[in-house]
Structures are given as structure tokens and as C-alpha cells.
Image (cartoon, grey):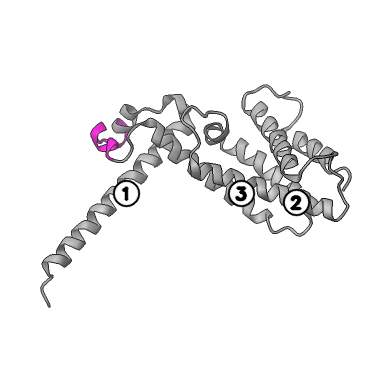
Amino acid sequence: MPRMSVDDARARQSRHKKQQRDALRERILEVSRGIVKREGLASLSMRKLAEAIDYSPAALYLHFRNRGEIERALREEGHAQLRAAFAPHASIADAAARLRAMGLAYVQFGLDEPETYRLMFMDHANGNGANAAEDSAAMLSLIADAFLELQAAKRLKLPSGAAAAACAQAFWANLHGITALQLNGAASADVAARALVELSLDAWLAAC
């Protein structure tokens, strides 16, 4: 069996160290997700994380300089989750049905992942980051495309002077309002979230 060269040994050692670093980084994020889901974002701290994974705080700082960087990483993961929730509906041929499916998927995501949603759209103390902004833009583009298709087919008349992009923003604001009111406990307990979404979508798509 041929002996491993010095360069090969160093390369192997380097790969092993990278695997260890990547594993620790994922472990930090995994435990962070758990803390945020169980106790809320305010409970997340570097000290609590270090205790939970049985590492020194110094080891955490090798991967994340502060709690804000962990928040940004979790926020970007949340946007990826939302993008995945939209994906099955993006290919629906009928634009009105597509808007309805995406609207319901958006609100359901927020209700299923309340702390992640709050971190993504209701707590901006540390900024969203470039990747999250790109994901939001991609989501708005999908919504705007549906409005454009409905307008081109003369199935929907947009308000005078309104662009599809502006309508997409308004549509998103509508969905976010429903989600935020539900998460904050401000919505009436007599009306289910899905019913509110359906009523809003009916109003948006009445002309279709």
C-alpha cells in the first residue's frame, strides 16, 4: 500500500478540520433554532449557546462574531424555507389560482414558524442582509408576474396608474398584516386566519 505524501496528509488534515468547523457551525445554528422556537429571540445569547453545546464562548466566536450574525444566518434560512413553500405553487398555470395558493402558503408559513417569521419580517434590529433582500425580491417578482398575467388577459384591471410591482407590494402588505396580527394576538379569535386570507384574496381577485 503506497504511503501518503506529506501534501496529501496536509490536504486530508485540512479537509478534516473544515468538516469539524462546518459541523460545529451547523450545531450552533441547530441549537439557536431550538432556543428561538422554544423561548423566543430575546432568549438567544452567546453564553446560553455555549452552555447548550458544551463549548467555550471563544469557540462560538470563531464562527459568529456576535449574536447578530447568528440572527442573520437564521433569517436567511427562514427566507429559504419560505422560498421552498412557494415553489410548489409557482408553476400553477392560472395566475389567479397561483396568487391564491401563494397567499395561503405565505400566511401558513408564518403561523407554522412564528419565531422565524418574526425574525424575518418583524425584527430588523440587525438588518436583513443581501441574501434575504434577494429572496424577498424574488417573492415579489412571482406575485407581480401573476398580476401582469391577469392584466394582460384583461381579467384584472389595476387601479389607475398602479404598476404590477406596486400591487405586489400591497398584496404582500395585506398578507403580512394578517400574519402579524395573528402572531401578536391582536386578531379576533372568532375569525380563523385562513378565513381572513380567503376574504382578502376574494377581494383582490374579485374581478378574476
Which residue lies under the disc numbered 2?
146
Magenta-drawn stretch contains 55? yes
**Percent x, y of residue 131:** 50, 45
Image location (x, y in percent) of residue 18: 27, 53
Examine the rendering and report whether any part of residue 16 can be seen: yes
Q: Residue at x 45, y 37 (%)?
A: 72
Point out the frontmost of discs 3 and 1. 3
Question: Which mark is drawn over residue 23?
Answer: 1
The residue at the point 47 percent across, 31 percent down is 38
Mark 3, residues whose alpha carbon is within 10 Å: few (<14), some, or many (≥20)?
few
Q: Is residue 128 above or below residue 97?
A: above
| Direction from residue 18 to residue 114 in the image, left or right | right
**Label 3 sits on what residue type?**
Ala
Q: Residue at x 75, y 45 (%)?
A: 164
Compared to residue 181, the image places residue 3 above or below, namely below
Disc 1 is placed on an element classified as helix
Comparing 125 with 203, the one in front is: 125
Q: Which residue is mark 3?
A: 138
Residue 56 visible in the shown view = no
